[in-house]
Image (cartoon, rainbow, N blue to C red):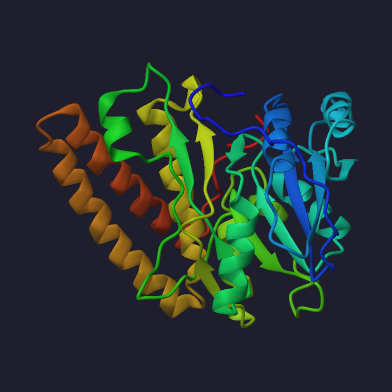
Amino acid sequence: MNPDVMIPKPGPVTPRVADPVTRTVDVVVCTFRRPHVVETLATLDAQELAPGTEMRIIVIDNDTAPTARAAVLGKAEEMRFPVTYFHAPGPNISLARNAGLDMADADLVAFIDDDCLAERRWLAALVARLETCDVDAVFGPSRAVFGATAPAWMREQDHHSNVPVRRGGEVCTGHTCNALLRWRGTPWRGERFDLARGRSGGEDTEFFFRLRRRGARFEIAEAALVHEKVTEDRQSLAWLRRRKFRMGQSYASSAEGIPAQAALAVTALTKAAYCHLRASMGRNAGARAFWVLRGALHAGVVAGCFSKRSLTIYGS
């Protein structure tokens, strides 16, 4: 277990009469060569569910060989909640997510990444927000946990945390590191993640943009927290710059039609130029990094509007 994030262990279970099932949830966890998935499963097994909730965990192993099988099934033997393991060789994260959706047969589908640790009331908080707001999907924050070697500016600016946002007062899209989606009987039951984005990332951003066009309504569940340890290979400006560029490419999918894409590209190009100027004037490493990363995001939007091939991040 990650020592930087304290996830309480479940206490003794008091026998009681089971609540009648009012909602079923399939939690999809896609994994690719990450032993950490066992720690993620441990936090899922420690969940304190809302009354009437029935949970199943679906683990999709996206490696070429079923390398996570033994660890996942070994952990499953000691867990309270049922675990289904499936090997979907790729590597392509969209392929893995689609396999999870193919297997999902619950009222709701939740998503969490294999390098995240969920707090004990994570799923209950997602469910409560979904039902209280009467929306179709909710997104919770993923808080970064930095190691000792992370630069000070990276900690302060916290580019690694994934916090859902509103644009113009609305939640327009979200991320599968921390999400809950209505599934059974919905008009988007046949929708799947874009395979073309499965090596670059951003497939979840585009997926939820698409669902919104089909009428899905979204909200934010601030209390549904997960924690993600930032590995050393991600504690660099170069890695963050690639990520921000890819995020910009994904955001470009919000523009439908050539006129909207052209308008977005012009705006983003102007912003990218301004950020480049500010980066060149930066007085310290933190200020320069801030503007470099903002510029990379806007440059990615321009590239996305012109359908430039996305960077390969996943599966390499």
Q: Residue furthest bottom?
A: 215
Give how far across and how far down residue 145 sits, in percent: 45, 31
Quadrant of residue 185 within the rendered picture: bottom right
Quadrant of residue 217 within the rendered picture: bottom right
Please give the count of numbered marks on the rendered protein: 0
Q: Which residue lies furthest to the top in this view?
A: 149
Along the horizontal axis of the image, is 316 left or right of 190?
A: left
Q: Is residue 3 above or below residue 133?
A: above
Q: Is residue 163 above or below residue 134?
A: above
Q: In this view, does 146 lie above or below 188?
A: above
Quadrant into which the C terminus falls? top right
Quadrant into which the N terminus falls? top right
Give how far across and how far down residue 10 sits, in percent: 69, 36
Q: Residue at x 51, y 78 (%)?
A: 257
Give how far across and how far down residue 267 sits, in percent: 29, 66
Along the horizontal axis of the image, is 131 left or right of 173?
A: right
Give how far across and how far down residue 287 sits, in percent: 18, 36
Quadrant of residue 269 within the rendered picture: bottom left
Along the horizontal axis of the image, is 230 left or right of 120?
A: left
Answer whether residue 207 is visible to the viewer in this image.
no
Q: Residue at x 87, y 29 (%)?
A: 69
Q: Residue at x 44, y 71 (%)?
A: 261
* Residue 136 or residue 66, whichever sits in front: 136
Answer whether residue 124 is visible to the viewer in this image.
yes
